[in-house]
Amino acid sequence: MNRWLIRTLLLALVMTFLWSAGLAQKVVTIPTLQYVPLDSLRKLDTLQSAAAGKNLDKTPYWHGADASSDTVSITGVVMVKPSILAYTLTRYNIYIQDTTTGQLWGGIDVITNDTLAAAQASGITALDTGMVVTMTGRLEEYGSQNNSLLEMVHYSASTPVYTGGTIKIGTLLASRPAAKEITLDSLVKGTTPLPSRGEKYESMYVVVRNVTVVAVDYTYGTFTVQDAAGNQISTYDASGWYTLRGFKASGSKYSPPPVGTQLSYLRGVIIPSSKANTCGDYRIAPLYPGPNQQTGSKYPGDIGIASYAPQVSSITRTPTPPKATDAVKVSWIAHNLNTGLHIDSSFFNWRFGSNTAVPWTRSKVTAISGDSSYTATIPAAGGDSLVSYYVEVYGGGVYGVSPDPAKPLFYQVRQSGLTIKDVQYTPYVGGISGLLGDTITVSGVITADTTDIKQNLSGRPTLWMASSTGAWNGIAMYATSASSGLDTLKRGDSLRVTGVVSERGVSSSDSRTCIQVMPSSTVPSPVTVFRRGVAVPAATTVSMSGSGSLSYQDANRPVKGTSPFEQYESVLIKTPLVYINVMNADNTAGTGSSNFGEFFVSTTKGATTLAYGIRVNDDGTNSYYCDTTQAYQTAWATAHPISPAKTKLMPVGVSIASLTGILTFSNGEYKLEPRKNDDFGTITGITYQIGDVVPKNFELSQNYPNPFNPTTTIRYSLPTSSSVTLKVFNILGQEVMRLVDGEQRAGAYAVVFDASRLSSGVYFYQLQTDAYSNVKKMMLLK
């Protein structure tokens, strides 16, 4: 080959390399990434949710799919540090903005896919507001709606891995740039989002002024504001300081401003999110806390109150509980919290039923004492009915309402007598009984007694009762004294109890509907037992298939009253096949702190902490616990001195054919409370250490029974600590199950193998350690 040809080939290789490198990483500005031509956005204004509008807001650096989008390098100033943004759970997340003051199209979301050491090593956790940084990552468009969120994934554990994405920190500004002044019509017209106006503010830190709160979501802690022209946007609870969800920041005092409150300003980052029949709503996410959200904060906060809505308090009704023939008197007190102002007028609203199509009956009410005390009357229901009501007030031209009309107060009228379901049922999100404070009498069967679950309310033992299988049909009970006889009841007792409906829990953060059974000195025969040893209503089988089912992510726990959880509060439920994937639901790292005995199960084998499942509480008298490291030791005996010790270890990864228990609410979250050992279905992969004598030799014993159907036990011995795997293979040599996989100390062990999902035939099981391997045959006969 001649020299000219060699030089030509080398030059071509160099040019190809440089061209490829240029494709792999492009140095661009944030506005260059975000900019979308106005014509495209105007089309999206019109098309909204139509399929034809799907890609009209996408960056030109995104090529139809996230996997094929460009890798870019950008420079910007950090607007919010990762610890503030909690809505992405275990992922690190920040917003950065172009360094040019007031630059439109200038904001972008930067996120990591996980919390692996490589992501932490990039330096993202060290970032703070005001830092000018240079970052590298792949672009993605997040959201199923047409108006999606442009993100830059700085680090990904999947292919490709951005090993060269280390953050470069440049200058440090005295403070983050001031919020960009906008008006609500910069984003929407009425309630319709307009990308042609709003897209240039995506991911930018903005401020809107002089708006009024018109709706509140007390599940998330978000609220909707409106300007004088009727334009509306809602907040987004991305920050741990401005949410009521499970990722609420520790120490946060946040509660959303009530309907009618006038805000002097509302600051935050603009984030697109899904909204029915639109291209995707623009929402504003407040970020930094003021004194009303964090004690000692020197920052005024991202929500400024101009004037508070008039406050309504002490709403009471008589008689309690009402009968079908009773006219119900409702009383309340109204206050104007703004200095020097008074209440001008008040209105009362009521209706029969929870059907939103039924109009409210609204009447103006005259104060009976000054301008603060009011009463109104709801006519007799005349039969079975659910009655809803709420109060409106006006003061100094400002409107107030209590409670939110979307979640009004209510009570149930029953001519034939109340049931447990009537006490528990609520058609509105919130979880508070409509009969709170009423003295009621209901009947049912004890589903968990003091020998099943060791849990106290107000220092007295807790029991559970159900009227039948299904939603809303279970309730917790406790007595104020032993004289009621409640403490002596046993599972299977059929009874009638009289008590006060209360909202009590095992901690100050709890709020679950209970019956406080009256003492015999107050009510003759508060507990009447009809029969003993009757069949307990069967456990209700529930779905645990992800969002919308009776399952949640351990890092994103549902708040009190969230559907569908609330309907199963205190109900005996049964899960499908689950796997233990977190040995300590409070301490996923498995270190020596937060060492209670609660673990997390999921329907997904080998799942991460982001999988959907449910927390399993440790107040039941069963023998099972989950603890697999020497650093982490369950402090169960210390935390529960009145309960028997846990003796049967379930390592992470074992499967439980089904799990039965009371769905309870304690320490601010829903948990499953198994009672005794028989609430645990067949456990596969659970390994028991037999005795404390160290064997002299490695040994794999024949399974017993053999043949078997469907479970059998396999024993083996380890004379030294070893890395151990115990696998099951079919006759073709294919692995069908891995029973043990990990380090084990010297000792004799037994493991249960459940083959209920396998067909009859010959199988082999293999024990393999650092210094030993053996295979044996077994037979499954169904």
Image (cartoon, rainbow, N blue to C red):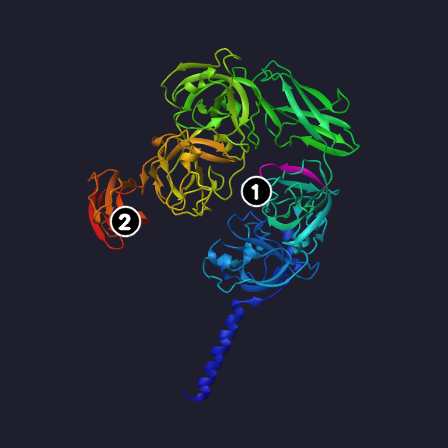
Q: Is residue 215 magenta?
A: yes
x 75%, y 22%: residue: 367
Q: Is 148 positioned to the left or the right of 175 in the image?
A: left
In this picture, residue 715 sits left or right of residue 298: left
Q: Which residue is mark 1?
A: 250
Q: Which residue is pictured at 45% across the width and 86% down the height?
A: 5
Image quarter of residue 438: top right
> Where does residue 144 sit, x and y in percent of width and height?
54, 50
Report the residue at 38% width, 37% height from top.
576
Q: Is residue 616 visible?
A: yes
Discs 2/1, front: 1
Q: What is the x, y in percent for residue 437?
A: 58, 21
Amino acid marked by disc 2 = Lys
Circle 2 is placed at which residue position? 727
Residue 214 location in percent, x, y? 68, 38
Q: Secondary structure at mark 1?
A: loop
Q: Give, as a three-letter code, the residue at label 1.
A: Ser
The stretch in magenta equals 211-219
Q: Most prominent secondary structure in the magenta stretch?
A: strand
